[in-house]
Image (tube, rainbow, N blue to C red):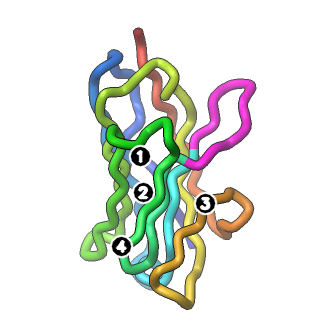
């Protein structure tokens, strides 16, 4: 499964960005998805995750109310809408996918994901 993340860039604090992760149609609907981030000198952490059926989501406490994960089956993409960005959101953001038999499962740790995108850099200036 090849994942292609895009949408990163430089934004001022308080601004918004929308990340997108594209996958092949053959596998998209069979996966749960997650967005992770890794800041310099820090471990990779989960930002948001969504189940295969899109009904269940999970967010890190630090982004609740500001970020929204969504999946768009027609376009085979998963998006991360990031609003009210803060300097501490600066990181490389990665999308990840995992094949699921059950449609309601949400994965919250990095080692549960089989497939990873290449990362896209988000820089928030204060």
Q: Tell me if 72 is positioned left or right of 50 in this view.
A: left
Residue 4, visible in the rendered structure: no
Q: Mark 4 vs mark 2: give the one in front.
A: 4
The rendered magenta stretch, by its main secondary structure, is classed as loop
Of helix, strand and loop, which one carries label 2? strand
Residue 107, given in percent of the width and then of the height, sits at: 59, 67
Crowding at label 1, few (<14), some or many (≥20) Cα neighbours within 10 Å? many
Of helix, strand and loop, which one carries label 3? loop
Q: Tag on residue 54?
A: 4
Q: Residue at x 35, y 55 (%)?
A: 79
Q: CA distance from mark 4 to mark 2?
A: 15 Å
Crowding at label 4, few (<14), some or many (≥20) Cα neighbours within 10 Å? many
Magenta span includes 45: yes
Q: Tag on residue 108?
A: 3
Instruction: Count numbered badges in the picture.
Output: 4
Residue 90, given in percent of the width and then of the height, sits at: 51, 25
Q: Is residue 76 above or below residue 60?
A: below
Q: Tag on residue 21?
A: 2
Residue 75: quarter of image: bottom left
For marks 4 and 2 on the same chain, the one whose residue lies earlier in the sequence = 2
Q: Is residue 40 above or below residue 1?
A: above
């Amino acid at each position: 499964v090849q994942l292609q993340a895009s949408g990163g860039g430089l934004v001022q604090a308080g601004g918004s960005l929308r990340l997108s992760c594209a996958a092949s149609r053959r596998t998209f609907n069979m996966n749960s998805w997650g967005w992770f981030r890794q800041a310099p000198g820090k471990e990779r952490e989960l930002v948001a995750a969504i189940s295969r059926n899109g009904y269940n989501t999970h967010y890190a406490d630090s982004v609740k109310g500001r970020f929204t994960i969504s999946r768009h089956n027609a376009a085979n993409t998963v998006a991360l809408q990031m609003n009210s960005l803060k300097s501490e959101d600066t990181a490389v953001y990665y999308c990840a996918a995992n094949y699921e038999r059950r449609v309601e499962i949400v994965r919250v740790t990095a080692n549960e994901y089989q497939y990873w995108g290449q990362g896209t850099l988000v820089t928030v200036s204060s």
